[in-house]
Image (cartoon, rainbow, N blue to C red):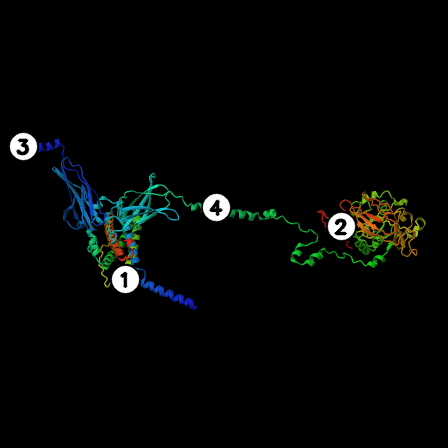
C-alpha cells in the first residue's frame, strides 16, 4: 500500500507538470543527390515537454545488424547523412528514428529505402543567359553547368535538364526541355523586355531538382524583321493576282470585246470566209462570180440584133433576152461614153404600162422572165397612177415609160390574175397600121401589156441595169393596140431616133427607107451616155442632133428636160429604197450583187 | 545485265557484307541498349505504381523480403567506386546475366497478369507483355554488344528461377506478383545503370553526352 502510494505520487507529480514521453517521430524523406550518398530527414513528434533525443537506426535487408546514423550534423537538424561508405545501392535500408526523453522513448514507423530510387540531384549551376544577334533576329542563349556533385562523366548518373522562361508580369512559365545538353536557345522573345530564366535537372530515374535562382536577361530593342509579314503580303498579292487572272480568263471574251472591238468583216452574200482563210482564193471569188457577167458582148451583135415588134397586143413582144441582157450590161456604166448605140437599140419594149393595166389583162400570154428582181414590183401601181395623164387610148397618150422589160415575178395586184409576167415582150408591130395615123416616120408604139409597173425603168435594153433606164416619152403615139388591128406579122424594127415630140421613131429593118428622114436626123442613132449626175440623171450625149429625148419618169421626182439639149438627161428614178434596178439593196446598206445580173 | 548495273550490284553486296560484319558501331549499340534498358525500368516502375494503387495492407505484411529474389545471389557492385572499377566485359556479362535470369519469371508474370485480383488488371497485363518484348529486344542487342566487344569468354551467371506458380489464393498470388515485380524493378535498374556506365566509357568522342 505504501509502495503504491509512492508511485502514484510520482506519477501525479508528472501529471501536474505536464510532461510525457516524446511523441512519435516521423521520417519525412530520404534523398540521394548523386547516387553515392543519401540523407534522411525526420520530423519529431511532440516532445512531451522534456528534452528529447532522437536517434536513427537502420539495418540492411539481408542482415540483422542495426547501425546507428553516422552523421547527424552534416545535413542539419533532424537529419541523418549517410556517406559513401555507408551507402549501398540496390539494398533496402530499414530506417527507424527513436525519440527519447526522460519519460520514455518513441519509435517511428520503419521506412524501407532503396537508394537507387531516391535520387534527387542538386540544382544546376552557373546559369547564364546571353543575347545572340543573328540575321533572323536576336535570341537568348541560356547555358548552365551540371550540379557539382553529379558524376555524369562516368555515366554513373545521367541528368536531364529543363528550363523555364517568363516575363516579370506573366503568370505562367514557358518550359523547355533541354535533354542532356547544357545549353538552350530561346527564340521569339519580345523586344525590349526583361525575362526571368530558371533551370533544373533530373536523373533518368529519380526526382526533379529544385529550380535555380532566377537569372535575368533583357532583350534588346530591335525592329522585328517582319519577314513573316512580307511573306504574308507576298502570298496575299499572289493570291489576288491569281484570282484576277482567273476572272479575266473566265471573262476573256468580253474583255477581248472591250479592248479589241471586232472589225466588221465583209458581208458579201455568197462570200465564204472560211474558203478565204483556207487560202483558196479562186474558190472564194468563184462564188461571187455570176456566170455570164460581165457578159461578153459581141459588139457586132449590138448592131445586128433587132427588135421584133408585134402589131398585135396579144402578141408577145419577143426580145432576145440574152442580147438584151448583154446590152443591159454593156450600157450599165453611166459614164460609159460609147455610142450608146446598143442601149438605144430598142431591145426594150416600150410598154404602156398603165394602159395595159387599165385594160386589164387582155389575154396575153406573156411570159415574164424570171429574174430575181423582186424589187420592181412595189411602186408600179403608183406609177401606173402617175401615168394617168397619157392615156394611150386617146392616142395622144403620153408616152409611157420604157418599162422594165424583164419584170419581176411578183404578182401585181392590179393586174389580172392570169397575167403572166412576160419574159420578154415583143413590140407589137405597128408597121402595118401605122401609116395612116402615124407620122411619116414609123412610130412604134410599144406597149406592154400586163407588164407590171416596174420600179426601175430601163431605157434601152438595160432593164436590169442598175443605173439607167430611159424613159422615153412617146407622145402622140397611136396605140395600135386599141385601134389597130393587130397583125400577126413579125417584123424587126430599130429605133431610128427620138423626135422632139418625144416620140420614138422606129423603123423596120426591112424598110428601104432606112435613111433618116428629116434634117434633124443626125447620123447618130445612138445616144452615148455622157455621165450620170448626182441626182441620178443619166446624161446622154448627142453630138449633132438637137433632138433630145426628154424623159420623164412617171415618178414624181423626175423632171423633164426641154429640148434641145446637148445631152439627153436620162432620168431614172430611184424609188424609195430602190437605187438601181437589178441591184437589190440589202437591209444593211450593202449591195447584193447576186441579183445584179439576171439569171435566165 | 549491263556493265554499270553489274558494278552497282557488286558494290551493294560488298556494302551489305561490310555492314553486317561491322554493323553499327559499339557506341550506337550501347546507346540503343541504354535506351531499351531505360524503357524497361520505366515500365516496371509504372507497373509497380499500378499495383500499389490497390494493394491490401495485409499484403505488405505478407511480402517476402527482397533478399528472397532469385537473382540476389549475383555479386554486383553496390556503389559507384566498385562499379567503376569493374571492366566493361564484366559489367556487360552482369547485365546479360541479370537479363537472362528474368526471361522465365517474366513469362510467368505475363501469364498470371490477366487473372490478377486487381482492378488495374488489364493495364498490368498489357504492360507486362510489353515488358517481355523489351527484354527480348534488349537481350538480342546485348548479344550484339557482346560480340562487338569481342570478349573471349562468355561469363554468364546462371540464375535459375524455380517458381512455377505464384500461389493458390488470389491474395497470395497478388502478393507474389507484387514481390516478383519488385525484384524485377531493382534488377532492371541495375541493368540500366551498368549499361549507361558502359555507354559513357565507350563514347570517348562524345564527351558532351557523359
Q: Nearer the viewer, mark 3 or mark 1?
A: 1
Q: Nearer the viewer, mark 4 or mark 3?
A: 4
Provide the chain ID for the residue under circle 1. B
Position of the C terminus of chain A by quadrant? bottom right
Pointer 3 with pointer 1, Cβ within 8 A: no
Q: Quadrant of residue A95?
A: top left
Sequence-wise, the earlier of marks 4 and 3 is: 3
B11 lies above or below A31: below
Q: Which residue is mark 3?
A: A2
Q: Which residue is mark 4?
A: A236
Q: CA distance from mark 1 to mark 4?
A: 61 Å
Pointer 2 with pointer 4, Cβ within 8 A: no
Provide the chain ID for the residue under circle 2. A
What is the secondary structure assignment of the residue under circle 1?
A: helix
Q: Nearer the viewer, mark 2 or mark 3?
A: 2
Q: Which residue is mark 2?
A: A583
Q: Nearer the viewer, mark 1 or mark 2?
A: 2
Farthest right residue in view = A436
What is the secondary structure assignment of the residue under circle 2?
A: loop
Q: Which residue is mark 1?
A: B147
Q: Residues within 10 Å of mark 3 (few under 14, many from 20)?
A: few
Q: Nearer the viewer, mark 2 or mark 4?
A: 4
Which residue is located at x 18 percent, y 38 percent?
A45
Q: Quadrant of residue A290?
A: bottom right
Amino acid at each position: 500500500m505504501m509502495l503504491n502510494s509512492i508511485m502514484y505520487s510520482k506519477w501525479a507529480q508528472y501529471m501536474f507538470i505536464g510532461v510525457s514521453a516524446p511523441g512519435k517521430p516521423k521520417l519525412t524523406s530520404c534523398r540521394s543527390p548523386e547516387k553515392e550518398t543519401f540523407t534522411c530527414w525526420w520530423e519529431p513528434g511532440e516532445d512531451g515537454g522534456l528534452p528529447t533525443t532522437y536517434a536513427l537506426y537502420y539495418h540492411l535487408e539481408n542482415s540483422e545488424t542495426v547501425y546507428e546514423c553516422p552523421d547527424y550534423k552534416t545535413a542539419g537538424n533532424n537529419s541523418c547523412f549517410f556517406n559513401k561508405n555507408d551507402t549501398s545501392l540496390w539494398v533496402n535500408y530499414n530506417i527507424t528514428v527513436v525519440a527519447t526523453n526522460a519519460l520514455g522513448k518513441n519509435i517511428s514507423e520503419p521506412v524501407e529505402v532503396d537508394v537507387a530510387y531516391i535520387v534527387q540531384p542538386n540544382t544546376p549551376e552557373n546559369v547564364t543567359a546571353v543575347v545572340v544577334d543573328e540575321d533572323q533576329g536576336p535570341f537568348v542563349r541560356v547555358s548552365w553547368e551540371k550540379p557539382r556533385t553529379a558524376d555524369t562523366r562516368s555515366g554513373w548518373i545521367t541528368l536531364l535538364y529543363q528550363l523555364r522562361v517568363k516575363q516579370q508580369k506573366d503568370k505562367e512559365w514557358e518550359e523547355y526541355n533541354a535533354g542532356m545538353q547544357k545549353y538552350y536557345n530561346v527564340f521569339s522573345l519580345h523586344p525590349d523586355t526583361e525575362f526571368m530564366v530558371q533551370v533544373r535537372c533530373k536523373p533518368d530515374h529519380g526526382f526533379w531538382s529544385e529550380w535555380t535562382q532566377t537569372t535575368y536577361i533583357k532583350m534588346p530593342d530591335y525592329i522585328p524583321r517582319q519577314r513573316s509579314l512580307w511573306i504574308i503580303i507576298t502570298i496575299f498579292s499572289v493570291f489576288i493576282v491569281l484570282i484576277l487572272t482567273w476572272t479575266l480568263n473566265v471573262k476573256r471574251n468580253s474583255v477581248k470585246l472591250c479592248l479589241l472591238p471586232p472589225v466588221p468583216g465583209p458581208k458579201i452574200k455568197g462570200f465564204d470566209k472560211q474558203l478565204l482563210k483556207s487560202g483558196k482564193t479562186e474558190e472564194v471569188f468563184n462564188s461571187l462570180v455570176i456566170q455570164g457577167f460581165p457578159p461578153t458582148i459581141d459588139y457586132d451583135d449590138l448592131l445586128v440584133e433587132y427588135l421584133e415588134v408585134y402589131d398585135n397586143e396579144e402578141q408577145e413582144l419577143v426580145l432576145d433576152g440574152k442580147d438584151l441582157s448583154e446590152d443591159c450590161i454593156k450600157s450599165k456604166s453611166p459614164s460609159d461614153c460609147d455610142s450608146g448605140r446598143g442601149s438605144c437599140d430598142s431591145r426594150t419594149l416600150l410598154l404602156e404600162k398603165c394602159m395595159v393595166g387599165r385594160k386589164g389583162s387582155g389575154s396575153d400570154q406573156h411570159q415574164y422572165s424570171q429574174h430575181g428582181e423582186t424589187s420592181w414590183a412595189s411602186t408600179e401601181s403608183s406609177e401606173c397612177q402617175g401615168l394617168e395623164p397619157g392615156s394611150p387610148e386617146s392616142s395622144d397618150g403620153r408616152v409611157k415609160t420604157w418599162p422594165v422589160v424583164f419584170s419581176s415575178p411578183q404578182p401585181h395586184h392590179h393586174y389580172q390574175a392570169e397575167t403572166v409576167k412576160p419574159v420578154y415582150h415583143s413590140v407589137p408591130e405597128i408597121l402595118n397600121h401605122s401609116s395612116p395615123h402615124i407620122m411619116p416616120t414609123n412610130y412604134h408604139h410599144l406597149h406592154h401589156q400586163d407588164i407590171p409597173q416596174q420600179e426601175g425603168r430601163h431605157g434601152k435594153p438595160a432593164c436590169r441595169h442598175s443605173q439607167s433606164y430611159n424613159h422615153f416619152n412617146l407622145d402622140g403615139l397611136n396605140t395600135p393596140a386599141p385601134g389597130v388591128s393587130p397583125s400577126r406579122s413579125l417584123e424587126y424594127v430599130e429605133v431610128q431616133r427620138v423626135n422632139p415630140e418625144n416620140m420614138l421613131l422606129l423603123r423596120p429593118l426591112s424598110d428601104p427607107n432606112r435613111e433618116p428622114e428629116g434634117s434633124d436626123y443626125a447620123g447618130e442613132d445612138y445616144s452615148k451616155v455622157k455621165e450620170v449626175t448626182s441626182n441620178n440623171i443619166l446624161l446622154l450625149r448627142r453630138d449633132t442632133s438637137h433632138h433630145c429625148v426628154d424623159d420623164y419618169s412617171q415618178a414624181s421626182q423626175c423632171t423633164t428636160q426641154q429640148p434641145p439639149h446637148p445631152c439627153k438627161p436620162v432620168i431614172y428614178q430611184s424609188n424609195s429604197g430602190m437605187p438601181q434596178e437589178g441591184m437589190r439593196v440589202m437591209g444593211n446598206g450593202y449591195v447584193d450583187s447576186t441579183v445584179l445580173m439576171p439569171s435566165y | 545485265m549491263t556493265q554499270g548495273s553489274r558494278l552497282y550490284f557488286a558494290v551493294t553486296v560488298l556494302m551489305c557484307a561490310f555492314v553486317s560484319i561491322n554493323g553499327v558501331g559499339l557506341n550506337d549499340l550501347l546507346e540503343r541498349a541504354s535506351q531499351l534498358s531505360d524503357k524497361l525500368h520505366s515500365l516496371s516502375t509504372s507497373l509497380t505504381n499500378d499495383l500499389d494503387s490497390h494493394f491490401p495492407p495485409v499484403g505488405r505484411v505478407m511480402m517476402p523480403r527482397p533478399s528472397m529474389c532469385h537473382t540476389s545471389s549475383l555479386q554486383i557492385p553496390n556503389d559507384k567506386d566498385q562499379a567503376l572499377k569493374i571492366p566493361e566485359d564484366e559489367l556487360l556479362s552482369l547485365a546479360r546475366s541479370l537479363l537472362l535470369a528474368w526471361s522465365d519469371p517474366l513469362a510467368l508474370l505475363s501469364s498470371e497478369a490477366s487473372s490478377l485480383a486487381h482492378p488495374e488488371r488489364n493495364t498490368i497485363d498489357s504492360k507486362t507483355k510489353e515488358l517481355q518484348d523489351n527484354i527480348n529486344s534488349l537481350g538480342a542487342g546485348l548479344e550484339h554488344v557482346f560480340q562487338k566487344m569481342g570478349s573471349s569468354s562468355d561469363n554468364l551467371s546462371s540464375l535459375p528461377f524455380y517458381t512455377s506458380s505464384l500461389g493458390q489464393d488470389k491474395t497470395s498470388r497478388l502478393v507474389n506478383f507484387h514481390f516478383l515485380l519488385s525484384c524485377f524493378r531493382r534488377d532492371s535498374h541495375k541493368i540500366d545503370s551498368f549499361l549507361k556506365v558502359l555507354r559513357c566509357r565507350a563514347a570517348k568522342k562524345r564527351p558532351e553526352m557523359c
